[in-house]
Image (cartoon, rainbow, N blue to C red):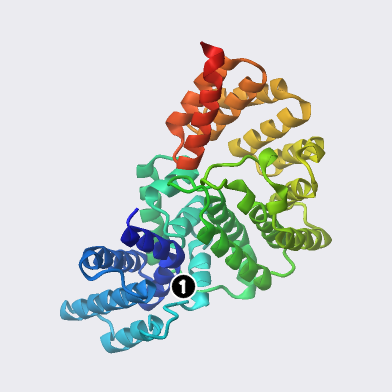
Amino acid sequence: MTSIAHTLERVHHEDYGRLVATLIRVLGGDFAAAEEVVQEAFADALAQWPASGVPREPRAWLVRAARNRAVDRVRRGVRLGARVDALEQVARIEQALAAPPQGTGSGDWEGPADDTLRLLFTCCHPALSEEAQVALALRTLCGLTTEEVAHAFLVPVATLAQRLVRAQRKIRDAAIPYAVPESEALHERTGGVLHTLYLVFSEGYAASAGPELLRVDLCAEALRLARLARTLLPRDPEVASLLALMLLHHARARARVAGDGGLVLLDHQDRALWDRALMAEGAAQLEAALALGGHGPYTVQASIAALHAQAQRPEDTDWPQIAALYAHLCTLAPGPVVQLNHAAAVAMAEGPARGLALVDDLESSGPLRDYHLLWAARADLLRRLGRREEAARAYTRALGLVRTEPERRFLEQRLEELRPALR
């Protein structure tokens, strides 16, 4: 990747959501216009930087480009007779997107923190379906492509695109306010907000596509917003549980990636690399959730993550209890991915044959037929049972579906390990 492409990708990852969130506010709640302005700013960079070079402060450059594009858009609207007070709107845009002066050495533009929270709660308005809430937040808040969001939902791209258009139209037609709701309305949006935050974190912790396994920027943003949500809703045990879950997972992030960027499975991770401070914070949040009466899906998942964190060695892992917790999770938050995780835990607790039977049931039921992790899990269980030809076919199927390079390399290595036995 060239330095220009690398820089643009980094700034996009770090600042897309904040820029869009602020522009939605200063452009009167117009999601589509805000996204277009940010995309135009990145297009400007792509057109100009090859000739002028990457600026010393690329983030500030892009903020100024977005500001100029937004101002141009307002002025064009005035010429076309739009009913806006152009001068006031331009002043708001310039104030909201005031980048630090060049030469300060910082080059940072933090953006108003409340704008991100406003966007999150607007996306999670109860007038929208929960699927639309999460899809819209992933697209606008995190800058995921429509293809990436579609993959996260396991739906066709065209279906997801229509879902996004309908959600934006609903916000506009229903005049949904772009604001963090008052305290009495906070709780009715909590479910959607937590679901969104967890999907954002999950996309960062296990990217659905691309050259890297982790997207640390997404994990950090999800954690930042989860901490804000915890402050807003200090008596909600599921908020505390979700924060605990994220912290306990994120503590293992460094050990999940090998020096060459490859995937390292849990059993092979160097546990000395686990971040003990994050684990302690996660455990404290889980204790707080339980003290508040937590027993929902995030509390169960955080309890599973805590059991992994407590194991000093892979063989110390309490797989029977983890399998039991996943079984409970299947009743609280049923879904095919939860069932797949349950099958994997059962395989560890009771043996691969028992886990394979559950995976085969899932495969025949259909929803995960094109999900690479189902085929990777099936391949691993067949390999452990010595059914190498079937394992090879399952690895090949997984390879045809996987979308990240580290996972592709891992699956290719596993398939290569089987070849001598197949000759």
**Quarter of the view holding residue 26:** bottom left
Residue at far left of view: 79
Q: Secondary structure at mark 1?
A: loop
Name above or below for residue 376 compared with residue 64: above
Residue drawn at x 56%, y 25% is 363
**Looking at the image, can residue 127 be seen?**
yes
Left or right: 162 as drawn, with respect to 204: left
Mark 1 surroundings within 10 Å by alpha-carbon count, few (fewer than 14), some (14 through 19), many (20 or more): some
Q: Position of residue 382 (x, y in %)?
A: 62, 20
**Looking at the image, can residue 174 be seen?**
no
Residue at far top of view: 423
Residue at far right of view: 291
Left or right: 419 as drawn, with respect to 148: right
Residue drawn at x 67%, y 60% is 243
Residue drawn at x 67%, y 18% is 385
Q: Nearer the viewer, residue 167 or 380?
A: 380
Residue type indicated by callout 1: Pro
Q: Nearer the viewer, residue 344 or 194?
A: 344
Q: How many marks?
A: 1
Q: Position of residue 140 (x, y in %)?
A: 42, 61
Q: Position of residue 119 (x, y in %)?
A: 48, 68
Q: Position of residue 186 (x, y in %)?
A: 62, 68
Q: Nearer the viewer, residue 287 or 123?
A: 287
Name above or below for residue 17 compared with residue 266: below
Name above or below for residue 331 compared with residue 239: above
Say which residue label 1 marks. 177
**Quarter of the view holding residue 155:** top left
Residue drawn at x 62%, y 71% is 228
